[in-house]
Amino acid sequence: MNAILSSGEAAPEISKAQAVDMKLEVAVIPVADVDRAKSFYSDLGWRVDADFVRGDGSRAVQLTPPGSPSSIHLGENPVLFLVVSDIEAARAELADHGVEITEVFHRGNSGPVGGPAPNHASYGSLASFSDPDGNRWLLQEVTTRLPGRVDANVTTFTSPTELAAAMHRAAVAHGEHETRNGGQRDENWPAWYGEYMVAEQAGKPLPI
């Protein structure tokens, strides 16, 4: 079903035939001492993206080598992260290829909870599968980056599918923006779209 933009025009539907972008973004490497490993990699000049405790009590530590589009997590069990912008579509595509993949889930305080994260919160919705050799892959839905995770001065879209999905999210947000401003058509909508899409990818505050 096509989305209706605030101008009354129907947004073009993203073709289901198009492959969903799955970006190899994070590799979890097993370490015996997280703090020692964090110190080692940060001393190499690797950017520390995150160090926090999740709701389930597990610790998340992410570092990125200089200039690298991919990062590492320090943990116990090796796993590879594939970042997607639409986890249901990505899961369906893998299932169509015969992959045995879990249903979409999110992390709760006591462990995995079935279904996507509330409001499809960025970084929250997951699904996992393994290859014939037991290598584990984790799909993670990311639409809005946390601050510091990407170069805020560079905005990139690697495929028409990814760009179209970002434009669709901007269109929905822009409709809400026009509603808040009395429902009048915003003639400067291209600039607003651009500001929104750049801010969303960089993890900066979104325009309202």
Image (cartoon, helix red, strand yellow):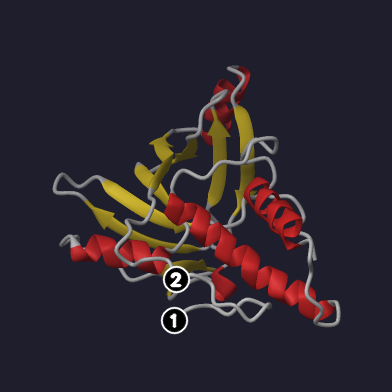
Task: Please rate how many residues cluster around mark 1, counting C-alpha atoms within 10 Å: few if below 14, some from 14 to 19, many from 20.
Answer: few
Image quadrant containing the C terminus: bottom right
Residue 196 image offset from top left, x and y in percent: 70, 56
**Which residue is painted at 48% across and 39% down in the image?**
73
Which residue is farthest top? Answer: 44
Q: Can you tell which quarter of the image residue 87 is in?
A: bottom left
113 up-or-down from 182: above or below: above
Q: Is residue 98 left or right of residue 155?
A: left
Q: Amino acid at mark 2?
A: Glu
Which residue is tagged 2?
A: 13
Residue 74 image offset from top left, x and y in percent: 48, 38
Q: Amino acid at mark 1?
A: Met
Residue 178 image offset from top left, x and y in percent: 78, 75
**Which residue is painted at 48% across and 78% down in the image?**
2
Report if the CB atoms under discs 2 and 1 are less than 8 Å apart.
Answer: yes
First of labels 2, 1 by sequence position: 1
Q: Check disc 1 and report its element: helix, strand or loop.
A: loop
Q: Which mark is residue 124?
A: none
Q: Is residue 60 left or right of residue 180?
A: left
Which residue is tagged 1?
A: 1
8 up-or-down from 198: above or below: below
Q: Is residue 69 left or right of residue 48?
A: left
**Which residue is painted at 75% across and 58% down in the image?**
192
How far apart marks 2 and 1 lie (CA) works out to 7 Å
- Front residue of this view, candidates 133 and 2: 2
Task: Please rate how many residues cluster around mark 2, counting C-alpha atoms within 10 Å: few if below 14, some from 14 to 19, many from 20.
Answer: few
